[in-house]
Image (spheres, helix red, strand yellow):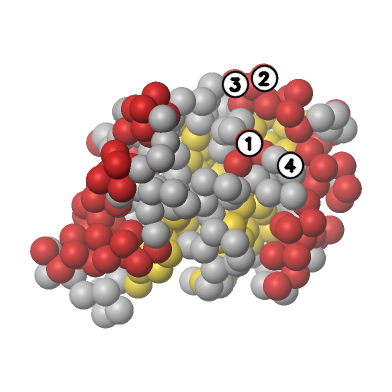
């Protein structure tokens, strides 16, 4: 059995839990260690029983508490060479035995979870998403995606569960308070995925057999949960896909743990 929970998801901080009976992982620690500890305990998990932390990229909303968490609980941090180089000063000193590397595109194992990191288009040094394989099940985490291409879709396909970015509504972003250079960054091919594109991808994946979809990394200023959900709902309806019957869709919460999924 796989247990998955988005502990926090949004532009202000991100962290996800994925575990089995004997292996427990955090994907990103983008908030304070205190908040992550509280979120873990709220879903019945103990922070000192974690096997590892995986880091997708070096932006602060993904690494803010990683160093402190590693030092407090003696937990290894896995990241690729580019990400380690970009985040090392930010996370602070990490014990030599807890500073571990993976190669983007090459699978590796932690306990009984096989992990494949794949490249994503984002304005970071070497950003990745993750596929997790446990038995015949596949879970995918994919946020901070500037655009969708065939290679990404190939990594997403056949996922039993995916947390997919649905960052912004394009019109809200255009008329919102952000300066133009930040708007341009978000809308670029190395920025963030819009609700509209998330809807198209989610519908495509549902047709391919994915049955659990979380919409994540919503912008506080340029989106809101009901709009993200409705946009994806509309995309599903256009393809005659019934949410609740053919696929389950929910929005990962910004400020607390979302629904726990066991598959």
Residue ID for mark 4:
66
Of mark 3 and mark 4, the one earlier in the sequence is: 4
Of mark 1 and mark 4, the one earlier in the sequence is: 1
Q: Quadrant of residue 22?
A: bottom right
Looking at the rendered image, the disc whose residue lies closer to the viewer, 3 or 1, is: 1
State yes or no: discs 3 and 2 in contact (Cβ < 8 Å). Answer: yes
Does dot 1 land on a helix, a strand or a loop?
A: helix
**Could you say which disc has been placed on residue 85 in the image?**
2
Q: Nearer the viewer, residue 241 or 134?
A: 241
State yes or no: discs 3 and 4 in contact (Cβ < 8 Å). Answer: no
Residue ID for mark 3:
82
Q: Which quadrant, please, contains the N terminus?
A: bottom right
Up/down of 35 relative to 99, above or below: below
Of mark 3 and mark 1, the one earlier in the sequence is: 1
Q: At which x and y percent is residue 140?
A: 45, 51
Badge 1 crowding class, 10 Å Cα cut-off, few under 14, some 14 to 19, many 20 or more, is: many
Up/down of 177 relative to 125, above or below: below
C-alpha gap between disc 3 and disc 4: 16 Å
Of mark 1 and mark 2, the one earlier in the sequence is: 1
Seen at 73% across and 58% down, the residue is: 35
Q: At which x and y percent is residue 190?
A: 38, 28
Q: At which x and y percent is residue 239?
A: 12, 64
Up/down of 91 relative to 116, above or below: above
Badge 3 crowding class, 10 Å Cα cut-off, few under 14, some 14 to 19, many 20 or more, is: some
C-alpha gap between disc 3 and disc 1: 15 Å
Badge 2 crowding class, 10 Å Cα cut-off, few under 14, some 14 to 19, many 20 or more, is: few
Does dot 4 land on a helix, a strand or a loop?
A: helix
Seen at 67% across and 39% down, the residue is: 63
C-alpha gap between disc 1 and disc 4: 10 Å
Q: Nearer the viewer, residue 197 or 203?
A: 197
Residue ID for mark 1:
60
């Amino acid at each position: 059995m796989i247990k998955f929970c988005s502990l926090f998801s949004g532009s202000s901080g991100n962290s996800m839990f994925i575990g089995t009976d004997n292996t427990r992982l955090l994907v990103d620690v983008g908030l304070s260690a205190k908040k992550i500890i509280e979120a873990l305990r709220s879903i019945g998990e103990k922070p000192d029983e974690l096997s590892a932390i995986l880091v997708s990229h070096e932006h602060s909303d993904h690494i803010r508490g990683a160093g402190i968490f590693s030092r407090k609980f003696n937990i290894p941090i896995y990241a690729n060479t580019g990400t380690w180089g970009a985040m090392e000063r930010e996370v602070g000193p990490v014990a030599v035995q807890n500073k571990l590397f993976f190669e983007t595109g090459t699978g590796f194992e932690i306990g009984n979870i096989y992990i494949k990191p794949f490249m994503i288009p984002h304005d970071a040094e070497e950003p990745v998403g993750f596929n997790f394989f446990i038995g015949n099940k596949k879970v995918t985490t994919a946020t901070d995606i500037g655009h969708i291409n065939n290679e990404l879709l190939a990594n997403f396909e056949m996922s039993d569960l995916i947390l997919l970015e649905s960052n912004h509504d394009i019109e809200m972003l255009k008329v919102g308070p952000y300066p133009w250079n930040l708007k341009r960054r978000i809308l670029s091919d190395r920025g963030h995925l819009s609700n509209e594109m998330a809807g198209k991808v989610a519908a495509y994946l549902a047709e391919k057999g994915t049955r659990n979809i979380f919409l994540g990394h919503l912008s506080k200023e340029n989106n809101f949960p009901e709009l993200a959900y409705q946009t994806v709902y509309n995309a599903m309806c256009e393809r005659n896909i019934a949410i609740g019957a053919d696929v389950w869709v929910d929005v990962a919460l910004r400020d607390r743990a979302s629904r726990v999924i066991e598959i």
